[in-house]
Image (cartoon, coloured by chain):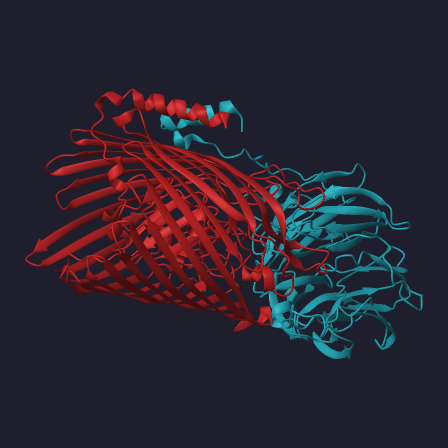
Chain colours: A cyan, B red
Amino acid sequence: MKTNNYFLLAITIFSVSIFSSCDPETEVPIPIDTGYEGKGVFMISEGNFGTSNSTIDYFQTSDNKVIEDIFNIANTPLKVGSSLQSFTTYKGKGYMVLNGTAVVKVVSLKDFKIIAEITGFSSPRYITLINEEKAYVSDWGTNSIQVVNLKTNKIESSIPTGKGPEQMLLLDNVVLVANSGGFINDTKISIINYTTNTVIGSKELSDKPTAIQKDADGKIWVLCSGNANDFTTTDDDTQGKLYKLNGSNYEVEKSFDIGIKSNHPDRLAIDATGKTLFYTGSYEFGFGIRKHNISANALVDTAFINGNFYSLGIDKKTNVLFAGDAKNFSQKGEFNRFNISDGKLINKIACGISPIGIQIEQ
Amino acid sequence: MRNFWVIIILFTFFNCTQAFCIGDTTLLKEIQITEFLRNKLFFKSIQKIDSSILVSYQNRSLTDLLNEQTLVTIKNYGAGGIATISLRGTNASHTKLIWNGISLNSPMLGLFDYSTFPVFSNSKISIISGGQSAEFGAGAIGGVINVDDEADYGSRFKLSFSQQMGSFGRSGNSFNLQFGNNKFQSSTFLNRLIAKNDFLFVDYQKFSRPKVKLENASTIQEGVRQSFDWRPNSKRIFSLNSWFQYNNRNLAPQIGNANNVSTIVDRSFRNSLEYREIINSKVNIQTNIGYVRDFLLFKNRLKLADSIAELLSSQSISEIYTLSSKLNFKPSDQYNFQFIAEGFKESAKIKEYGGLKARNRYSIAVSVSRYFFNKGIISANARKEFNDLASPFIGSIHSEFNLFGKRGIKLLNSVSTNYALPTLNDLYWKPGGNINLNAEKSFNVDIALEKKIILNNISINNSITAYWSKVNDWILWQPSLEYNGNWSPQNLKRVRTSGIESTNEIKWTRSKDSFSFRLNYSYTQAINTKSTTENDQSVGKQLIYIPLNSGLAQIKYQLKTFQIRYGTNYYGYRFTTSDHSDFLPSYVLSQINFQKSFGYKKYQIEIDAGIYNLFNKTYQNLPDRAQPGRNFLIQFNLKYK
């Protein structure tokens, strides 16, 4: 604070013009073409918990340019909403699943303008687009999958699953659902026939199945976080595990214990070749990003990339690994871009608060 | 420091131009040397709430009062919900709330929820800004809110009943019975308040931007306060104040989070027993015993399609025992010595601590004051606290002088070191709690000029304060490597605050009517000066939620028993992210009150009608917390003497 600032202030007081102080100037977003070219990466940030400052930033791979907060640019004054958990693209449309606001917002990928809003959820987490008419939305709080009619953008029915359904995997006739445990715990994945919308079975794994992927050989990989149980102690923690399941009958072919009992990894990604898995824990400091070759017989117990990462995603078009750094959650985060073959940092890109993941056009 | 002199010079100039018309000032009369010294020490920057306006605040929360009548920063988590305070850019736990000599801040969180404090119109409320740890102990880095319920020994019998009704399902009533004589006084205050807070707001996160009703925001508050004051002779006073308060609140969800329907129930039992005695013309003593018990039940709930799921239920009980004794020794007209010895036992029980955790604290303090007849005072204070942590030895020097002889400009200076202890949550919360934390320490410099001018029937009061302070070892919770990625508190942050506060009032009194105008302004800079993470973008930037500028202007006109008040408050923009990537816009709120009283024999009726948020502004105090538009409140008070 410089002398003349105080001087000016004092003058201000005496001249009774105290209400003239101005707010910071904000760029008035003009509804424009976002310049979306279909060659980049959508970077998804949750924002502060409970606050409507979730964002999607668009990263142009060709020139490393970032278009910040594209939803805001296209839709002001409408806000994104709170706790954007995931964003999924499907045939020219984008589906933003907002856990806090409890809606799914549908945007056109051409100009990112909102075209519909699906309501009636409790705490939606992920969306799986089955075909042009049907989508499944995992609704964490209601322990069910909400079946959405994409023609009307309305929930038509719901399918009860295990507790706290999160990630889903679309296969030929079925959708697999990871039941992450909800308020307490769960150990199963549910198997749903998507033609009849019925649960046809489930598979017992271990505590808190959270993430799910399919590899190049058609095998299913499920990451079970393990349960922290009483947060005040690590004595009662259960082991985090990685499972390899048969792609047709979902029998466990292999299972691996991850790190030590108090590690609770919850992010799983697979590269473009479908041969290498990457996993980390959003609250696991020092765990780093670990790598697993799908045919290996044991896990590598050291980090492939060191650091603390809140999220993990792979741009399958360029085979670049995006790892989100949430910093202290009260300021904008960053995505670290890593070369997937050697783990070298390419660059860091600023994004919104609490980067939760990425999405490319599908 | 050079900067401050510019202001002083300016201020002096401003006042000297009017110095020819100064009436007689009675500055030193305020310092009644033989008086019991509780809260009567000269302090920097005391703001007393005018008791005549308390009628409008009877049975409303202290939040409303502080918001409308002062420039303290209130963080308001939605209608009826939690509200915390920030004095001079500091944390909520850096302001102590003292009620009849005992601190009501939670030992678990270190802060007080001001929305749970219904105003009782007989209270004396003052705000003492700036570091006060040497006088008030740990925690008073930002300042102290002091509430005293003092007995009126002149009164024989008073009975009053008040009823209030307001917008959004608000209704309340209170009852006060006072009786006694010049030796004994009893006062009973009962209050009850219900509010639905079901106002409309625009849900700007929905495509169609619908106007929706705020749900899950209703509150019930009930309280009983009883005080007994016994004055067996002119040299001894016993006071017992007991207060039971029950609050049952639904916490309004943030806009767009309508499914989050949390609740909080709290029950507090607060007791203060005080004994004061004048032993002889040179010595007086004061002893205070306090007991506070807080029960709190918080439920984080999620609304499902046709039911409500409980995500978390957290119950805690905390207790504080206080014993404090003061001895004043005044050997001559020039000197006064004060010795203070205090002991506290704080304890809390919650699942996350793994059982009961307690902390004993003892402190001793000494104060020496030197009086210069008709000129001023200098006082030096020192305090040392003993507990399990490394508490600093702290001290302060305050001075108050009349400049230019009797012209009535008062210069107040103060230099102090202050501290705040880590809360029990900081120490013991699992996971993350860190028992190796140090006390937060601050260094504080204040300079103030006060001026009273009385010219016939016009009186003018001006004051301007400049302050500078540095807080080291500020405790910050953030994800930590040592704690396996869990959030954990560390003595990480360093904050520098500086600012200016100015209060100005002009009052014009005639035989039948009076008019007053008040203008307050405050400039608050609170800068984070230390990086806490790699590539931290918050260094050198204003702390979140602290407005740089705030101001208020009020006009009051009184004609016999009729009063009209108009007030307008300006609340500057606040950043909401520490890297300043986002902010909340400034807002101006206005309110108007009409007050009229009628008397008939021994009965008196007071009516107060207020319109709040007069211009129906849409505003947010905190992100996505809906606030009501224009609303009305009417109060009837029936009194019998």
* Residue drawn 81% across the image and 64% down it: A213
**Is B403 located above or below residue A201 in the figure?**
above
* Residue drawn 36% across the image and 57% down it: B101
Locate the C terminus of chain B and report the quarter of the image it occupies. Answer: bottom left
| Identity of the residue furthest to the left in this view | B601
Q: Is residue B74 left or right of residue A51?
A: left
| Identity of the residue furthest to the front in this view | B331
Q: In the rendering, at what x and y percent does residue B402 appear?
A: 31, 30
Q: Is residue A80 visible?
A: no
Work out whether residue A117 or residue A97 is closer to the camera in this orientation and state it.
A97
Q: Is residue B516 left or right of residue B630?
A: left
* Residue drawn 17% across the image and 41% down it: B558
Q: In the rendering, at what x and y percent does residue A329 appear?
A: 64, 51
Work out whether residue B511 or residue A74 is closer to the camera in this orientation and state it.
B511
* Residue drawn 33% across the image and 57% down it: B286
Work out whether residue B121 or residue B75 is closer to the camera in this orientation and state it.
B121
Q: Is residue B35 visible?
A: yes
Q: In the rendering, at what x and y percent does residue A273 appear?
A: 90, 56
How many labels sit on residues?
0
Q: In the rendering, at what x and y percent does residue A332 appear?
A: 66, 45
Q: Is residue A334 left or right of residue B510?
A: right
